[in-house]
Image: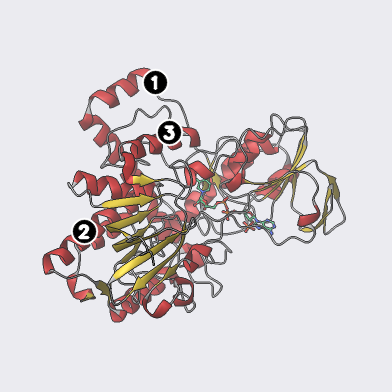
């Protein structure tokens, strides 16, 4: 009889090479701890910035703020970086981790082994690894949401989801339909319009759009930012604080209403066609969904070969899209900018905590995580950018860095106690969830919009209901009394 090979064991396994996974890996390297491996399902790093490659894809947070403070500086080319530059930045960071990243290592399941006090991680190729601590940086917006539209499967032309755009797909000279008017749509629409023969945009809800004021950095500015770390830090702090101040409007609806008036005025000035103006004037309170940034959305909608259709879609045929009032649009290609499966992200099925309980089952009553990271029944397991740790008004990278620092102090505390296992107490988790629920009720996100922030019961489970600074304050220390140890 041949003995089965010993399982490969690591003190820490990190899953994912997006901003979250790389942030923790680099933070740990900087702290002189090289006891981990990073598993990446694809053959290159980058997470969402590798997968979202639709034309026009860019970041709506300024680059100098949308980068890791624990990593070497990057010579950003413009105020709002485009996706390829962000992907190159992440690839550069990943390169510095060398063989610590294992590519084409797709996690099939990860289950807690109570007796051994270990996580067992199984990969798609059948190999298995174990680790004491497991961190999932798998991204909350990773799984595309396909709309449930009658006949969608009958469409004969290319069906392209923004989150799974094929390389080098050219829609030149084609009649293109675009479903959705969210953050992805307002980027892909203006990028497709110049090359499409016709572009029909199907809008269900008119979004709030404000000017982005994007521009390339002058060579002199880049040189100065590269040479003067204090200037770079001051610039980053200024970008951070101006965004943080915008958070005031989310807490004081009176302030948001004043901003609303300004946007309505801009819209009336910039859009000359009164019928179009009527269609794009938002009817939901500003801020109850993500406020979108664009310098080109409204002007794209005014182009003669672009149509904004607001009639609901009735069904889709092989070469047509038909609306409820009977309008038939002949289309060669259909672009779905319909977002992500946040509330029912299938990744929750991968993780099995105590007694084989999956995260999906654990979240049946409500998606939540203590400080956006930990759940009872899931010892030694951390989620990055988990429930209640998203942001609507500032950089998610700031939240990620708060989380990675907190994880580092948690791991240091457990090691100092000489323990193998720790988990958040059910009471601490319940108190945190209740606090989030109460604070969310006062936010704009729960004032009548449908969005991926809300669960089927209409509760915010995605965003941190406060200033990001208050999240930093809460995560600056590890609160040992909220945990059980073994
Ligand atoms: O997705 P969304 P997204 N029939 O869910 C419409 C991040 N992000 O990919 O508004 C017709 O916001 C839907 O209509 P409605 C960012 O966090 C960041 O645009 O629900 N329409 C909506 O218009 C963002 O919040 C960047 O009525 C249907 C659209 O599709 C998140 O990703 C860039 C439909 C979906 O909008 C998601 O943004 C891009 C149907 N059946 C994205 N189903 C940055 O710059 C859906 N829609 C950092």
Location of residue 371 with respect to 305 vertically, above or below: below
- The label on residue 88 is 3
With 374 as the anchor, is 160 left or right in this view?
right
**Ligand 1 within 8 A of label 1's CB?**
no
> How dense is the environment of label 3, judged by Cα within 10 Å: few (below 14), some, or many (20 and up)?
some
Residue 252 quadrant:
bottom left
- The label on residue 476 is 2
> How dense is the environment of label 2, judged by Cα within 10 Å: few (below 14), some, or many (20 and up)?
some
Location of residue 272 with respect to 162 vertically, above or below: above
> How dense is the environment of label 1, judged by Cα within 10 Å: few (below 14), some, or many (20 and up)?
few
| Residue 277 place in picture, x, y as percent | 69, 45
Which quadrant does the C terminus fall into? bottom left
Q: Earlier in the sequence, mark 3 or mark 1?
A: 3
- The label on residue 218 is 1
Label 1 SS: loop
Q: What is the C-alpha distance between the residues marked 3 and 2?
A: 30 Å
């Amino acid at each position: 009889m041949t003995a089965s090979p010993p399982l490969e064991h690591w003190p820490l396994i990190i899953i994912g090479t997006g901003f979250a996974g790389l942030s923790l890996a680099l933070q740990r390297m900087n702290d002189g701890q090289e006891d981990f491996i990073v598993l990446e399902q694809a053959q290159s790093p980058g997470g969402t910035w590798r997968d979202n490659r639709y034309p026009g894809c860019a970041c709506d947070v300024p680059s100098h703020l949308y980068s890791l403070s624990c990593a070497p500086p990057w010579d950003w080319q413009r105020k709002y970086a485009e996706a390829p530059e962000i992907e190159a930045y992440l690839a550069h960071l990943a390169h510095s981790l060398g063989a610590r990243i294992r590519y084409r290592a797709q996690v099939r399941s990860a289950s807690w082994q109570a007796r051994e006090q270990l996580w067992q991680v199984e990969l798609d190729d059948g190999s298995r690894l174990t680790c004491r601590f497991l961190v999932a940086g798998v991204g909350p917006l990773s799984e595309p949401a396909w709309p449930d539209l009658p006949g969608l499967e009958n469409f004969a032309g290319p069906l392209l989801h923004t989150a799974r755009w094929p390389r080098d797909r050219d829609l030149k000279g084609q009649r293109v339909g675009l479903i959705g008017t969210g953050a992805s749509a307002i980027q892909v629409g203006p990028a497709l319009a110049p090359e499409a023969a016709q572009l029909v945009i199907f809008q269900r809800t008119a979004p709030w759009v404000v000017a982005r004021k994007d521009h390339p950095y002058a060579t002199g500015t880049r040189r100065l930012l590269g040479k003067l770390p204090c200037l770079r830090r001051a610039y980053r702090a200024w970008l951070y604080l101006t965004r943080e101040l915008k958070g005031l409007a989310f807490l004081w609806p009176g302030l948001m209403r004043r901003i609303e008036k300004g946007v309505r005025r801009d819209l009336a000035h910039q859009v000359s066609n009164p019928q179009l103006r009527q269609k794009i004037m938002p009817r939901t309170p500003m801020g109850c969904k993500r406020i979108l940034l664009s310098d080109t959305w409204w002007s794209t909608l005014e182009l003669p070969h672009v149509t904004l259709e607001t009639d609901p879609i009735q069904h889709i045929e092989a070469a047509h899209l038909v609306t409820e009032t009977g309008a038939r649009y002949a289309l060669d290609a259909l672009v779905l900018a319909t977002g992500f499966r946040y509330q029912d992200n299938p990744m929750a099925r991968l993780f099995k905590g105590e007694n084989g309980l999956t995260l999906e089952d654990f979240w049946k009553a409500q998606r939540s995580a203590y400080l956006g990271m930990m759940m009872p029944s899931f010892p030694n397991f951390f989620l990055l950018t988990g429930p209640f740790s998203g942001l609507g008004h500032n950089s998610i990278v700031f939240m990620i860095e708060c989380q990675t620092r907190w994880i580092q102090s948690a791991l240091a505390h457990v090691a100092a106690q000489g323990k193998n296992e720790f988990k958040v107490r059910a009471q601490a988790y319940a108190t945190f969830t209740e606090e989030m629920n109460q604070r969310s009720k006062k936010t704009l996100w729960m004032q009548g919009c449908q969005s991926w922030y809300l669960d089927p019961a209409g509760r915010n489970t995605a965003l941190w209901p406060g200033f990001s600074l208050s999240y930093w304050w809460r995560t600056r220390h590890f609160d040992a009394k909220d945990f059980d140890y073994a």
